[in-house]
Image: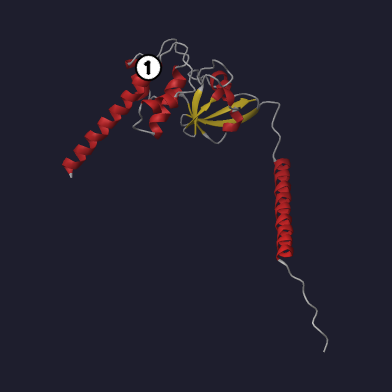
Amino acid sequence: MADTPKTTFSRRGFLKGAGVTAATTVIESANALARETKEALHADRTLGPDALPVKLHINGHEHSVTIEPRYTLAETLRDNLGLTGTKVVCDRGSCSACTVWIDNTPALACMTLAIDTVGRQITTIEGLSHGDTMHQVQAAFVKHDAMQCGFCTPGMVMSCAALLERNPNPNLDDVKHAISGNLCRCGTYPKVFAATLDVAQQRHQSAALVAIATERVA
């Protein structure tokens, strides 16, 4: 009977083999991902440079507009749709005067291509009010005289209103952080703080009154 050949096995050899197998798997996965990405890019239709029709969802309404892919959202809102509440001041993303909401998140309209907002919900300063009834933050800005030249005001209002949507009970530091990117050359920051905190207090009091009324009814 022939001797059974001995199998040489070592911990070093096992780890070396496992390492090669793992590396091969990673490389193959990376190559597959690269192929998929390349195919996806080639599958996408090239847009521009000519203007093309798109539909934008703004303030709860659908707008059809023909724009070049290079147009910013700020340009499109102001020049193509007549929504001039969105101000263009620095046009380089440093002052936040052009702040709008994209899917309820503050964004700079001057730094966003309009074509990139297709299929998303856009809210401008015009969309905060209901007819002739101002949004609470807008009314508070008037009450506290929180605007001077007015260029930064729409962006300030949008930033403060967004803060109150995600944090109904902010403190002073929260408000300061929310408008940290909004530049006011007139220096109305203290009044902006007061206006925003006033709205928060009003909402808190209203909620408390509703809770009391509900308890009495129950």
Asked if residue 134 shows in the view, the reply is no
In the image, residue 5 lies at what x, y percent? 80, 79
Report the residue at 65% width, 25% height from top. 70
Q: Is residue 40 visible?
A: yes
Q: Which quarter shows the N terminus?
A: bottom right
The image quarter containing residue 41 is top right
Q: Residue at x 43, y 12 (%)?
A: 187
Q: Answer with left or right where residue 120 lies relative to residue 50.
A: left
- Tag 1: residue type? Pro
Residue 1 shown left or right of residue 218 in the figure: right
Q: Which residue is found at the position 52% from the left and 19% from the top?
A: 95
Residue drawn at x 71%, y 64% is 14
Left or right: residue 38 versus residue 62 is: right
Q: Residue furthest left?
A: 216
Against 177, is 211 above or below? Answer: below
Q: Quadrant of the C terminus?
A: top left
Tell me how many marks there are.
1
Q: Position of residue 174 (x, y in %)?
A: 40, 28
Q: Is residue 80 above or below residue 14?
A: above
Write down the quadrant of residue 213 in the picture: top left
The residue lying toward the viewer, choosing from 175 and 153, is 175
Residue 155 is left or right of residue 137, and the answer is right
Q: Residues within 10 Å of mark 1 (few under 14, many from 20)?
A: few
Secondary structure under badge 1?
helix
Give how far across and how far down residue 217 sits, in percent.
17, 42
Instruction: Check the image and tell me how it is coloured.
Output: secondary structure
User: Residue 120, relative to residue 5: is it above or below?
Assistant: above
Extreme residue toward the bottom, this view: 1
Q: Between 193 and 213, which is closer to the camera in this rendering?
A: 193
Q: Label 1: which residue? A: 190
Q: Position of residue 201 (x, y in %)?
A: 29, 27
